[in-house]
Amino acid sequence: MPDERNLRWYKKKKFQALLAVVIVLFLFCLFIMVINYSFPGFFNLAVQEDGTVKAESATAGELAKAPPDGWTKGLMMTDTMIVTGDDLFSNWLPNDKIWPTILLDNPQNYQLGALEMMRYTARAMRDYLARFGSADAMNHECDQAFTLLSNDPKKWLFPSAESRFKQAINQYRLYRNKLAAGEAGFSPREDNLKELLQQYVSLLGAINNRLANAPNSQRAKGGQSPISSPVDFSIVQTEQYGSVDVPWYKIDDNFYYAQGAAYVLRQMMVAIKYDFSVILNAKNAGPQVDNIIAVLDQCQFEPIIVLNGNIGSITANHSMELHSLLENVRQRIRNLSEMLRAVN
């Protein structure tokens, strides 16, 4: 048996054992990353005979059946927040510090975008939808839910972000139970719907601004974005943002952030279709909501690589493709607001 001291370094057992450990760790990390690289699918809420609501997977263009007559308005929107939150916060990635998923920036940014759209919805529910008039007291559960959702999404411990967000969803469960029992209110008035839609228009405007400034023609200026990560819209008013240059390494971050926001908006528009059906039908605006949902369905595409080609290039520009779809949605929501304002 040869003396190991005379062997080359890469033939020594200690090195081979260390290499084996490194390979096993690498494969383990790769496995963890693969199983966590996922995005949520569309769902529909089906009303059961016992009055509960069940989430069922759905494909693009497939909408749920309208709830039965007498179904309490507001339950669809609240249940949509609950189902979305349960899925989103069961595997929260943006605050990972040690786990291999820290490298999965696409799902992380997708979740941050989804969270931001939930925050905008939560604010509208607290300020307008969950009370009958501006002079009425805020609903306690909706107020607490918005506060909890406003926590730092990247906080790891003491407390962790997902623990706060899960508490917010539990507050919506309490509100949902009170709403079903007639102990809490939901006001599906025209002015409240317009306030909610205005929240969505505002957020989409800021997201589209980031997408619109991603083309190569903007990056060629060589400037660095004053914002190193997707905008935290809960802290800064979106209207403050003018034109910014987006560095090349942030293009996919903003792309998936926008997709996450579009996903939640799609689900909320389905809920709006049913919770505000009386107003929408009175204004002949139901088809407009369906059109908005149809465009949002198209936003959920995943390129193998997020490309950023110039106009006329043989490569795609996925940022501008998504921007075009979301700008279409934004204008349609504005048109929907105008339809609600019109007098029949």
Image: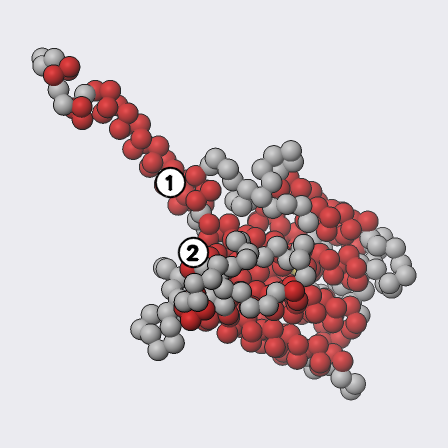
As helix, strand or loop, the secondary structure at mark 1 comes to helix
Task: Compare marks 2 and 1 and give the one earlier in the sequence.
Answer: 1
Q: Is residue 312 left or right of residue 146?
A: left
Image disc number at residue 249: 2
* Image side of residue 197 versus residue 190, left or right: left
Outermost front residue: 222
Q: Quadrant of the N terminus?
A: top left
Q: Residue at x 23, y 23 (%)?
A: 15
Q: Position of residue 18 (x, y in %)?
A: 28, 25
| SS at mark 2 in the image | helix
Amino acid type, residue under disc 2 in the picture: Tyr
Front-most of residues 96 and 60: 96
Its colouring scheme is secondary structure
Q: As drawn, is 201 to the left or to the right of 191?
A: left
Residue at x 88% of width, y 55% of height: 137
Which quarter of the rendered picture does the C terminus lie within? bottom right
Neighbour tally class for label 2: few under 14, some 14-19, many 20 plus, Cα within 10 Å: few
Instruction: Please name the amino acid that badge 1 sits on.
Output: Phe
Q: Is residue 22 above or below residue 319?
A: above
The percent coordinates of residue 64 (x first, y second) are 60, 65
- Can you tell which quarter of the image residue 186 is in? bottom right
- How many numbered circles are shown? 2
- The quarter holding residue 308 reads bottom left
Q: Does the rendering let one see residue 63?
A: no
Label 1: few (<14), some or many (≥20) within 10 Å? few
The residue where tag 1 is placed is: 31
CA gap, disc 2 to disc 1?
A: 25 Å
Query: In this picture, is 336 found above or below 208?
Result: below
